[in-house]
């Protein structure tokens, strides 16, 4: 079985690159027409963070992997993924989940989660580091490990908060660009069980979150670790001469700076595969998310092996699971509207218009992804507004949390989450298990901003912003614009009042309750009109 899979991988690989190619080959910029309204795009050739390596090295890594592949229908090629993959039913209707950036960078809590990259520089953040912790050859990034204590970490309290937020899934970062693993690993010694907290942070969270009936996965950024640190030459020379920090033999494979040969990269890529296998086997994730580093086509043979291993394992578990990737990482055609075997993720930016299929947006709760001491945190109103916009366009929002190094979630972030959960407790029927209508919103400026979602035969109109007063008019439901049928009832979620309405040339005019049932946004449920059917697809890609 394994020989067959490797052969299929090699054949797929050879279709992309000539044998013996030994120079880095980044994807060429896609030059065809793109539908920007739905966020159609290809891989970003200027920002991919994939290891600067060659197809030849990737092929060597694939051929040296000794892991036995699980038996199942998935083989490591695009044709097999396309034939066998389906978006999990649970994810289609989830609509709101949480992710998390927590790691060694939470200790200095300065600038952002890329602290490791920026601390090895002259001036700027490098100078700040030297001033506060010492020169880099005396106090390197590795020296934050004992300070990442997580002494106040309470997974049960975290899981309670996650549940109260209204999130349906939780996906913490299991390792960021620094490669420090937050789980009990036998593949890498640089992990939270053997160092720092001396705890299996991922395992404890997994158990607590699933105990509350929520889905659990994780985000994995480690592929970007191989060339993440790029110090100035003088700093490199000094450390090399001293055999210090980046060049300390005990830490060489943690930093991946002292040796960036083809052989070192081959070992790194094999290690990346083995870490994923360990995570899959150990925690049976409901979703596995990868950052930009897996985007480039020359990595296809390796990531296809991870996909086949994951999906065949999930068949054995009897679970619906999915990968979650960016841009054209799992779109061999070069455009994300033809994604195969993965849910598409947009980082921070929501498509301007409706995008059918299944997709999500990962977005920050504050001004940085990882905790920083001066980070600004968005309030519940801002997060709910973002959620409504994403869901009205048919997407799912994945909101990022930023815990402190001691294992606490800052009070300001907790307040925001509880505010979102309070709003969802009243209005969740207009969010969960919904899909887009024929238009995602109307109004704004001088008129109330109203967003739309659909569930079954019900149209939900979510009024964002301040309470509009005695009445509101929905222009999209004017006599000459409304879908087939006749409005038979209008209610407001959270209110028991029967609402009077009239359908006029100007729109559907609705008399609102005397008192608002909640704050932030207010949802009207309208029945009687013919609604468009669900716009999800088995592949997750947009409808043709």
Image: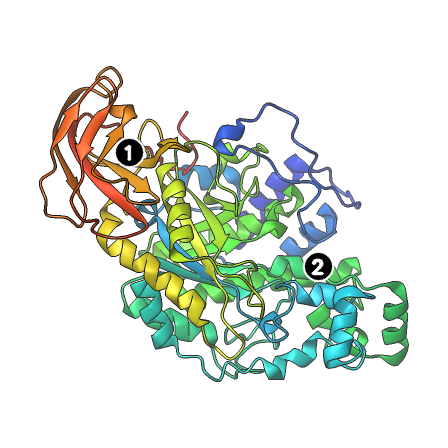
Q: Is residue 94 left or right of residue 264?
A: left
Which of the 4 image quadrants contains residue 251?
A: bottom right
Which residue was labeled with disc 2?
266
The alpha-carbon separation of the residues under discs 1 and 2 comes to 45 Å
Quadrant housing the C terminus: top left
Q: Earlier in the sequence, mark 1 or mark 2?
A: 2
Q: Tell me the residue at 29%/25% (across/down).
A: 476
Which of the 4 image quadrants contains residue 232?
A: bottom right
Looking at the image, residue 433 lies above or below residue 148:
above
Q: Tell me the residue at 86%/70% (across/down).
A: 235
Which residue was labeled with disc 1?
534
Looking at the image, residue 128 lies above or below residue 217:
below
Q: Tell me the residue at 45%/72% (across/down).
A: 409
Foreground of the two, 199 or 232:
232
User: Residue 75: percent from the left, percent from the top?
Assistant: 48, 46
User: Residue 72: percent from the left, percent from the top?
Assistant: 40, 51
**Classed neighbour count for the residue bearing mark 2: other residues with Cα under 10 Å, few (<14), some (14–19), many (≥20):** many
Question: Element under label 2?
Answer: helix
Question: Element under label 1?
Answer: loop
User: Residue 115: percent from the left, percent from the top?
Assistant: 67, 66
Q: Is residue 531 visible?
A: yes
């Amino acid at each position: 079985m394994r020989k067959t899979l490797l052969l299929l991988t090699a054949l797929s690989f050879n279709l992309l690159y000539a044998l013996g190619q030994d120079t880095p080959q980044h994807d060429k910029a896609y030059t065809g027409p793109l539908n920007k309204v739905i966020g159609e795009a290809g891989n970003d050739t200027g920002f991919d963070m994939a290891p600067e390596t060659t197809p030849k090295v990737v092929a060597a890594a694939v051929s040296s992997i000794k892991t036995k592949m699980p038996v199942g229908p998935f083989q490591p090629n695009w044709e097999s993924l396309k034939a066998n993959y389906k978006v999990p039913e649970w994810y289609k209707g989830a609509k709101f989940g949480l992710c998390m950036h927590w790691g060694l960078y939470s200790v200095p809590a300065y600038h952002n989660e890329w602290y490791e990259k920026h601390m090895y520089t002259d001036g700027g953040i490098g100078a700040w580091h030297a001033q506060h912790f010492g020169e880099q050859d005396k106090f390197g990034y590795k020296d934050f490990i004992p300070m990442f204590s997580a002494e106040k970490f309470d997974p049960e309290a975290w899981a309670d908060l996650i549940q109260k937020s209204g999130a349906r899934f939780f996906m913490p970062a299991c390792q960021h660009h620094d490669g420090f693993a937050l789980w009990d690993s036998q593949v890498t010694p640089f992990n939270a069980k053997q160092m720092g907290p001396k705890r299996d942070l991922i395992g404890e969270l997994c158990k607590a979150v699933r105990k509350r009936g929520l889905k659990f996965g994780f985000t994995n950024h480690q592929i970007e670790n191989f060339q993440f640190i790029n110090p100035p030459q003088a700093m490199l020379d000094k450390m090399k001469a001293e055999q210090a920090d980046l060049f300390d033999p005990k830490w060489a494979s943690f930093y991946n700076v002292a040796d960036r040969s083809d052989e070192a990269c081959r070992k790194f890529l094999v290690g990346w595969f083995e870490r994923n296998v360990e995570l899959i086997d150990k925690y049976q994730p409901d979703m596995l998310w990868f950052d930009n580093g897996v985007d480039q086509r020359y990595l296809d043979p390796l990531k296809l092996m991870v996909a086949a291993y994951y999906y065949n394992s999930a068949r054995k578990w009897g679970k619906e699971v999915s990968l979650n990737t960016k841009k054209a990482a799992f779109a061999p055609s070069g455009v994300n509207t033809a994604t195969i075997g993965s849910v598409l993720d947009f980082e921070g930016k929501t498509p301007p218009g409706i995008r059918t299929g299944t997709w999500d947006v990962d977005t920050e709760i504050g001004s940085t992804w990882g905790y920083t001491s001066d980070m600004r945190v968005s309030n519940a109103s801002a997060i709910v507004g973002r959620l409504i916009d994403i869901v009205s366009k048919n997407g799912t929002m994945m909101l990022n949390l930023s815990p402190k190094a001691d294992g606490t979630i800052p009070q300001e972030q907790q307040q925001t989450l509880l505010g979102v959960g309070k709003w969802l407790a009243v209005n969740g029927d207009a969010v969960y298990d919904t899909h887009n209508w024929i238009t995602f919103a109307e109004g704004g400026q001088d008129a109330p901003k109203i967003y739309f979602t659909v569930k079954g035969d019900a149209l939900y109109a979510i009024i964002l912003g301040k309470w509009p007063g005695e009445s509101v008019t929905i222009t999209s439901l004017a006599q000459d614009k409304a879908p087939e049928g006749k409005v038979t009832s209008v209610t407001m979620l959270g209110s028991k009042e029967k609402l009077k309405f009239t359908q006029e040339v100007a729109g559907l005019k609705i008399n609102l309750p005397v008192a608002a049932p909640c704050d932030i946004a207010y949802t009207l449920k309208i029945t009687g009109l013919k609604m468009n059917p669900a716009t999800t697809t088995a592949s997750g890609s947009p409808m043709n």
